[in-house]
Image (tube, rainbow, N blue to C red):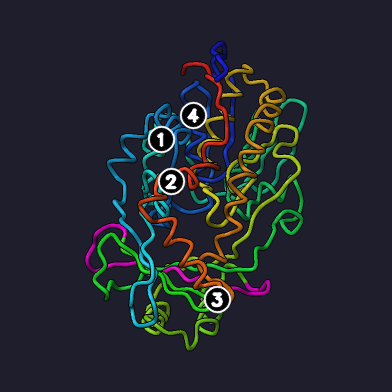
Amino acid sequence: MTNRTRGHSLAHLNVLVSGASVAGPALALNLARYGARVTVVEKAPDLRGGGFAVDFRGHVHRRVLTEMGIWDEIHARRTHMGPQRVVDADGTPRVDLPAEMMSGDVEIFRGDLARIMYERTREHAEYVFGDSVATLTDTADGVDVTFEQSAPRRFDIVVGADGLHSRTRRLVFGDEARHLRFLDHYVAGFPVPNHLGLRRSGLLYSEPGRAVCLGNYDGDPDRAGALLVFRSEELAYDRRDAAGQKRILVERFAGMGWETPRVLEALEETDDLYFDAIAQIHLDRLTEGRVALLGDAGYGATMGGMGTGVAVVGAYVLAGELALAGGDHRVAFAAYERRIGDFAKGCQKTSGNAGPFFAPPTERRIRSRDRMYRLLASRMLGGFFKRLTEKAATAIELPDYPAA
């Protein structure tokens, strides 16, 4: 570990962060520790609650969360999710997946994590909800920003932390199609009644090219969540048209066994649907001038790529490098790219297996998956399996950044 502790206050630095999901508040928290003036703009009218459960694993995640001062609070609000089971169409168990495989060392709902970081920063950062960046003009002295609602402002740097479909990335780096790599699968998630009586446990049923998962993460006896994954050619659909997305899911999962008919009934009733391609973002650079990309905006993966962990580590590194450089964005951005680039790509590689894991293309592949995980979950290979799941998450050396 490199011992670099000299740095400067960032009180003179005026930063705009676009996005208040996880990456944005994580950066706001880290920058606020160094005294930077931070504005976070978010198109949603309020902080988004709920969402999928996200996990952290390995010593790197733990160190970053500890230095951010939120490790204990995350543990206090963790899901306590137990093992998850793969089943046949009649519910017969095929294999149990250990909790650490699906939930890491600690797991928390995305909305709860965002709330923790928001509460830590709202007195030290300005949050603007119900607005978004309209244009960015990078100049020698700063970035001139216009907004959809607010008056124009100038910032020293702008950070796009606005997700897989980032507007910041589109404004600075070009059309999304140039950077998004489709991985042959789609995923959907929505709440369902807990008709199986699950309690902090989950069930997974797969048929060739499609899968349905049911899980209860919070212990509420009445609620569960459904996760649907299916293999597909790339589809043309409107990301704002929930009714159209429901039609796609009903068509793709028609005739599927197990609990699928009841899940599709719940789908028709829900007004809380997440639907997206399983995809990755790949760019040659994460920065341009005074603009940087963070989290899913720069190196996202829809699922399976430890995206939340990478985003939080990325926020820690970006803030730390700015502190080391005394706010000089040219020095800090170059160091951020060097340090986070390979780490993010390594985590992205694991996400390429997400779709085929949930929805193997053939019955033979389903049986092969089950045999492999039955072996990996055995007591004999338990330690090896844990190290395997942590490998990508720990493949970065963090310097000792200046004390806040």
Which is closer to the viewer, label 1 or label 2? 2
Query: What residue sits 66% from the left and 38% below the top?
Result: 342
User: Is disc 2 surrounded by few (<14), some (14 to 19) or many (20+) residues within 10 Å?
Assistant: some
Residue 201 location, x and y as percent? 30, 62
Which is closer to the viewer, label 3 or label 1? 3
Q: Are marks 3 and 2 in contact (CB under 8 Å)?
A: no
Residue 244 versus residue 84 in the image, above or below:
below
Q: Secondary structure at mark 4?
A: helix
Q: Which label number is shown at residue 364?
A: 3
Q: Magenta stretch?
A: 217-237
Q: Secondary structure at mark 2?
A: helix
Residue 40 location, x and y as percent? 52, 39
Residue 235 location, x and y as percent? 66, 74
Q: Are marks 3 and 4 in contact (CB under 8 Å)?
A: no
**Marked residue nearer the N-terminal end (4 or 2):** 4
Q: Quickly name the residue at label 1.
A: 122
User: Is disc 3 surrounded by few (<14), some (14 to 19) or many (20+) residues within 10 Å?
Assistant: few
Give the amino acid type for the residue marked by disc 4 in the picture. Asn
Which is closer to the viewer, label 3 or label 4? 3
**Marked residue nearer the N-terminal end (3 or 2):** 3
Q: Is residue 76 magenta?
A: no
**Marked residue nearer the N-terminal end (4 or 1):** 4
Looking at the picture, tell me which residue is in the foreground, 156 or 75.
75
Residue 353 location, x and y as percent? 58, 59
Marks 4/1: CA distance?
Answer: 13 Å
**Marked residue nearer the N-terminal end (3 or 4):** 4
